[in-house]
Image (spheres, helix red, strand yellow):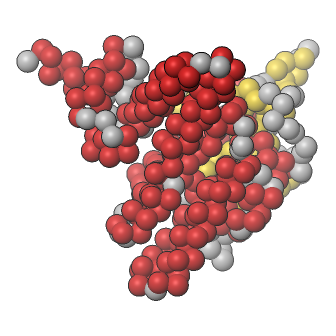
């Protein structure tokens, strides 16, 4: 991505691919009419490619079975996108080139551009006409997927949960009107309550609890960014989405501790399990918020931890060699040396 304010969208897009790759499967099926399931293995490759003219970085590059895929996430119109895509795809094909006898074979990936915003001029496909020296020609076509064309119903019906963190973006042009109109405000808040509830219904099991938690965190992260001009609305959406994250993880651990306690038939064991579970839920959530570079005050507000407790956890993460997003470890080392 080219614009500085696109960094957050880029980060969320790559976080989902790296931490929750199963979410891209329905997107691939939607674009390329395939029938992959969550059982199909996704092999991700480095997204830095080196050419004689210099290095380029793609948003994603991965393989499913014997097919290569390349997705770019774009938040704004870019007149050079067609040329960029064919350059990216050529660099991927060049890296995958293989030789058989005296001939090389280059396999181009199945590519797609995901547009988080679009307008009436955004095409359904990017097209580049390639003319060869022998006067033959072909049109290189890349499908475009427009996230805001998908309603909430579409997203859940087609399992396109990958789109949910960006759902708030369809409201960004009407924030002032929503804030001043109680009916529109109520409608928007109800929409996000419904999203939260439907998401929980779609990811009900213990194995999917972490996926739910991560998605809710990313929904809130994009919402916080988009809703910066509308502070009260930002807080209301935060209460609906962000305030439920710790609650969810705590509930999951309580359920697990309760099950163990009932199986053991020990009241004391149940109480200990609940206490330890709550402590572990809080610890996990603090660590995750620190890794996401959330402000100290926000972590304390969400978890009920003191400043000293949060800093102790941060210090522990630094000792484990974990790299925090804002280089807090480097800051803490400097403080110790003073």
Res 107 quadrant in image: top right
Please, is residue 72 above or below residue 17 in the view?
A: below
Please, is residue 234 above or below residue 263 in the view?
A: below
Residue 267 appears in view: yes
The residue drawn where x is 40% and y is 51% is 4
Percent x, y of residue 238: 44, 57
Percent x, y of residue 111: 75, 46
State the residue in front, 71 or 272: 272
Say left or right for 36 vs 89: right
Percent x, y of residue 320: 39, 13
Percent x, y of residue 267: 56, 22
Res 289 quadrant in image: top left
The residue drawn where x is 90% and y is 17% is 100
State the residue in front, 240 or 267: 267
The residue drawn where x is 74% and y is 49% is 202
Q: Can you say which quadrant of the picture contains the C terminus?
A: top left
The residue drawn where x is 49% and y is 78% is 185
Q: How many marks?
A: 0
Say left or right for 64 vs 48: right
Say left or right for 214 vs 92: left
Res 179 quadrant in image: bottom left
State the residue in front, 279 or 288: 279
Residue 81 appears in view: no
């Amino acid at each position: 991505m080219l614009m500085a304010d696109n960094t957050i969208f880029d980060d969320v897009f790559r976080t989902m691919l790296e931490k929750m790759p199963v979410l891209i499967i329905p997107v691939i099926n939607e674009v390329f009419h395939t029938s992959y399931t969550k059982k199909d293995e996704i092999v991700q490759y480095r997204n830095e490619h080196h050419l004689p003219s210099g290095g380029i970085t793609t948003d994603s590059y991965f393989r499913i079975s014997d097919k290569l895929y390349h997705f770019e996430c774009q938040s704004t119109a870019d007149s050079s996108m067609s040329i960029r895509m064919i350059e990216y795809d050529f660099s991927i094909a060049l890296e995958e080139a293989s030789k058989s006898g005296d001939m090389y074979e280059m396999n181009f990936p199945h590519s797609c551009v995901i547009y988080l915003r679009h307008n009436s001029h955004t095409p359904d496909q990017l097209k580049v006409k390639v003319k060869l020296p022998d006067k033959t020609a072909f049109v290189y076509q890349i499908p475009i997927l427009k996230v805001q064309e998908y309603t909430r119903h579409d997203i859940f019906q087609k399992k396109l949960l990958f789109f949910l963190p960006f759902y708030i973006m369809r409201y960004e042009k009407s924030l002032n009107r929503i804030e001043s109109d109680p009916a529109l405000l109520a409608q928007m808040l109800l929409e996000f309550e419904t999203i939260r509830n439907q998401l929980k219904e779609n990811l009900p099991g213990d194995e999917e609890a972490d996926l739910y938690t991560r998605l809710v965190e990313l929904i809130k992260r994009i919402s916080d960014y988009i809703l910066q001009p509308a502070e009260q609305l930002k807080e209301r959406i935060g209460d609906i989405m962000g305030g439920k994250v710790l609650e969810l993880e705590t509930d999951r651990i309580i359920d697990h501790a309760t099950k163990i306690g009932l199986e053991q038939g020990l009241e004391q064991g149940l109480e200990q399990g609940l206490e330890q579970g709550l402590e572990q839920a809080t610890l996990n959530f603090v660590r995750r918020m620190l890794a996401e570079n959330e402000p100290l005050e926000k972590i304390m507000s969400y978890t009920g931890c003191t400043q000293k407790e949060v800093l102790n956890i941060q210090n522990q993460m630094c000792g484990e060699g974990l790299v925090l997003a804002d280089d807090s470890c480097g800051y803490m080392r400097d403080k110790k040396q003073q």
